[in-house]
Amino acid sequence: MLDGPTALDQRFGGLPLSDSIARALRIMGYTAPTLIQRDALPPLLAGRDVVGRAQTGTGKTVAFGIPLVELLDPGRKEIQGIILTPTRELAMQVAEEIRRLARFRPVRIVTVYGGVPIGRQLAELRAGAHVVVGTPGRVLDHIGRGSLDLSRVRVAVLDEADQMLDVGFAEDIARILRLTPSGRQTALFSATMPLPIRYLVARHLRNPHWVEVGPPMAPVPTIEQVYYEVASEDRLLGLTEVLRERAETDKFLVFRRTQRGVDHLTRLLQRQGFRCEAIHGGLHQSQRDTVLRAFRAGSLRVLVATNVAARGLDIAEVSHVVNYDMPATAEEYLHRIGRTGRIGRTGTAISFVSEDDFTILDGLKEKMGEKLVRACLALYTRR
């Protein structure tokens, strides 16, 4: 039940928001909806199932978070919302955003994910939760233990659905949704809509309202895309040149294909005095959390990551994404560069193209057109 519209409604697209949500949005600095929020909020607030396609960094969490918080009944001591995400990091980030939206309502949000001891999560669930945010594997673990009951869920959200399918969660998602009431409201958000996603929609959503922001396979327009042709053995020189040319306050997310490659590059950059750390699946969750906190706080300037580790990362202040190793596909390229230019901010995507990368480069040129610009490194012009 909404508790009365406020003046913020008109500044936030004229939406009928409760006073508690409006106050929370004001504190969060939101005054107008992004495109995905503008188009997805009305049907979600009306109780419709929604499928939303938009690139990362467009405000999808707030788009599904507002209707979820509005619908919750704090007086009902039961799980009313379940949000599934592909990674631990994204689960934590989504949960924190929901808490900020619900700051003026007595709502309990519990986050569950693997890679950490389960005891604390069990205690938090026993204490009561209105919303659970988690990765599919750990959600099923709790269901199997009897610590998680989804029989009263009113809203289910599948966030970054294409990434969840990429890492093999399709059947886990189906099992979880089968344990929720058939009359629930379901929202699915994804950067891309391949056939497996459309099958998931047809199987689990009821006459959904489709919202699509921007053309398929397109980066957000605030990202400047640059590539350098560079010999494989010169990539480290090229990266150090790029890092030294940019402001010390800029934050770089650098991609490598393998964990070994991430660790090797991190050590080389540290030896040259750069504030740099690695993040990949071989690290303990506590190590990953420490690194991410340092990066967000600004005590780290460079984060070197694998694709899997960076999926779902929501670090709004990333100014540059660097493809030290080129991605294998255009879709992977878009997922990577979508880590910058988030929520209307500007960002730069830099790619190092070596001898074996021209096939993928040609494919990217076809899709990106004039947005992908060639530049030249000073290390070659000085020779």
Image: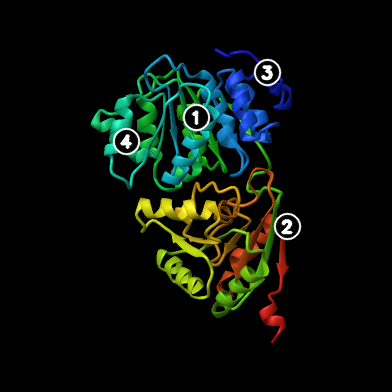
Q: Quadrant of residue 41?
A: top right
Q: Which colour scheme is used?
A: rainbow
Q: Which amino acid does label 2 sit on?
A: Lys
Kind of residue sitting beneath label 3: Thr
Q: Describe the element under mark 1 as helix, strand or loop.
A: helix
Q: Give coordinates of residue 335: x percent, y percent.
A: 56, 51
Q: Which residue lies furthest to the right in this view?
A: 370
Q: Horizontally, is 128 left or right of 296 in the view?
A: left
Residue 284: x and y in percent read 34, 54
Residue picked out by circle 1: 202
Kindly state the secondary structure of the residue where label 3 is placed: loop
- Label 3 CA crowd tier, 10 Å (few <14, some 14–19, many 20+): some
How far separated are the C-alphas under marks 1 and 3? 37 Å
Q: Is residue 73 visible?
A: yes
Labels 1 and 3 touching (C-beta < 8 A): no
Q: Which residue is drawn at 54% across and 20% down?
A: 70
Relative height, residue 178 to residue 243 (above, below): above
Query: Which of the two labelled residues, at mark 4 and mark 2, occupies the earlier sequence position?
Result: 4
Q: Which comes sooner in the sequence, label 1 or label 2?
A: 1
From the image, tell me which residue sits under label 4: 121
Residue type (three-letter) at the residue carrying disc 4:
Gln
Earlier-in-chain disc, 3 versus 4: 3
| 227 left or right, relative to 277 | right
Q: Are marks 2 and 3 in contact (CB under 8 Å)?
A: no
Q: Examine the rendering and report whether any part of residue 256 can be seen.
A: no
